[in-house]
Image: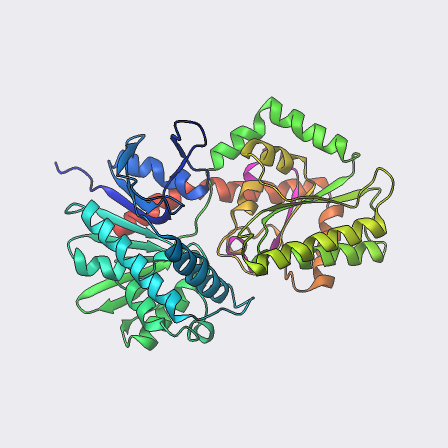
Amino acid sequence: MRSEPRVIVVANRLPVTRGRGEDRAWDVSPGGLVTALMPTVRERRGAWVGWPGSAERGIRPFSHEGVSIRPVTLGDAEIRDYYHGFSNRTLWPLYHDAIRTPEFQRHWWRAYLEVNRRFARAAANTARGRDIVWVQDFHLQLVPGMLRELRPDLRIGFFLHIPFPPEELFAWLPWREEILRGLCGADVVGFQTAGDAQNFSRLARRFLDLDGTDTELHVGRRKVRVGAFPISIDFSEFDQIAARPETLARAKEIRKRLGGRKVILCVDRLDYTKGIDLRLATVEQMLDRGELDPARTVLVQVAVPSRETVQEYADLRTTVEQAVGRINGEYSQVGRVAVHYFRRNLSREELVAHYRAADVMMVTPLRDGMNLVAKEFCASRPDLGGVLVLSEFAGASRQLRRALLVNPRDIDGTATTLREALAMRRGDGRQRMAILRMMVRRHDVHVWAHEFLEALA
């Protein structure tokens, strides 16, 4: 009986990071992708190809917890042009509905091309015959096609973690055919939603003149499957942390420190796609109209620092912090701050304690591939407490239909929904949360990984 093929993950980042101790040992990185794929790679005796996260050179391949680690080194100029430039200033805004105008720089594209070629070579040198190679995300969209040329014997999959734009936006990209051709090198191309998959298929048929349907493309004699594989979280991990006595005690302490008021919680990366500024504008309007009373309700905004060296992100931080200061200056009372703002990353345990302390969770991005915070909140409420207010422009809204859905650009409509969430009867809230938790439990991150690999195999 032949053994299962190995799984080789190719991602922008390695699943491990350098420790800061004297020995600078490698530690497993936090995050959903690593949690999802490391067990599978380990079980299949596979490897992970990725960038260590710095310009450090001379890092040789090594093994970590049964997984072969294959570092791909990048120089300072490549980090600037491939990562900060093309990936984060061209593709990121373009794929998020051009919320910010993308920049199209030819030297960024050249760096993207060269780095993708380096990743493809590393994957080709790592993989053996019959191996499955799973390429991850927008940083490496050329790798499937390049790898197909180098190793036509491999099964190749690609998954995009962010949205894939509609035809009229993707058409802006000067290198649109090259990106589409690169993605069509895969046997399975996966997206967060059916709409994203449909966008890709239609663009490939239009610009590459391919035959096929929304779910299958014909590339020469090959068939490329296209579909939605919505990513998720490790439900049991959050559920178990939420049930710990120390988590309950911390949640109780958080509520006590907030004065026993109703808690509206928001947790986001400090990114312009997350709609933090519009959310604050909604709360400010409600305070101004007397629809929120800071003596009874408090907003807690956790903003995780992101890309702070980029001017647009620095400007967003200034805008958000000015709004928080203005709201607190106008509406806070002695001992009753209207908005608590934290610009930091919380530990997993502290984050779950905040989830358990919240009466309402607001997840209102302007555009998001999935948004796992919404699913984390549901998994962290075994008490069936809390109400989820969710943007209809997050991929999670396709699955979490018992959340209260909003258009975050509609400040009046969002305010109405937030009032509904705060006033919701306990029985109605519990019924909604029970359904939401069932959905996240049944479709956790391990199911996601299994379904994609089954489609690929």
Q: Residue furthest top?
A: 245
On the image, the x and y values in percent for residue 202 come to: 37, 72
In this picture, residue 345 sits left or right of residue 8: right
Please identify the quarter of the rendering in which residue 220 is found: bottom left
Rendered view: 169 above or below 182: below
Q: Residue at x 57, y 55 (%)?
A: 271
On the image, the x and y values in percent for residue 384 come to: 62, 37
Q: Residue at x 38, y 68 (%)?
A: 107
Rendered view: 339 above or below 392: above
| Residue 196 covered by magenta stretch | no
Q: Residue furthest left?
A: 1
What range of the chain is rendered magenta?
378-396
**Whether residue 457 is visible:** no
In this picture, residue 396 sits left or right of residue 139: right
Q: Residue at x 74, y 63 (%)?
A: 412
On the image, the x and y values in percent for residue 144 come to: 27, 58
The type of colouring in the image is rainbow
**Whether residue 66 is visible:** yes
On the image, the x and y values in percent for residue 356 come to: 64, 35
Please identify the quarter of the rendering in which residue 349 is found: top right
Q: Nearer the viewer, residue 330 or 19?
A: 19
The quarter of the image holding the N terminus is top left
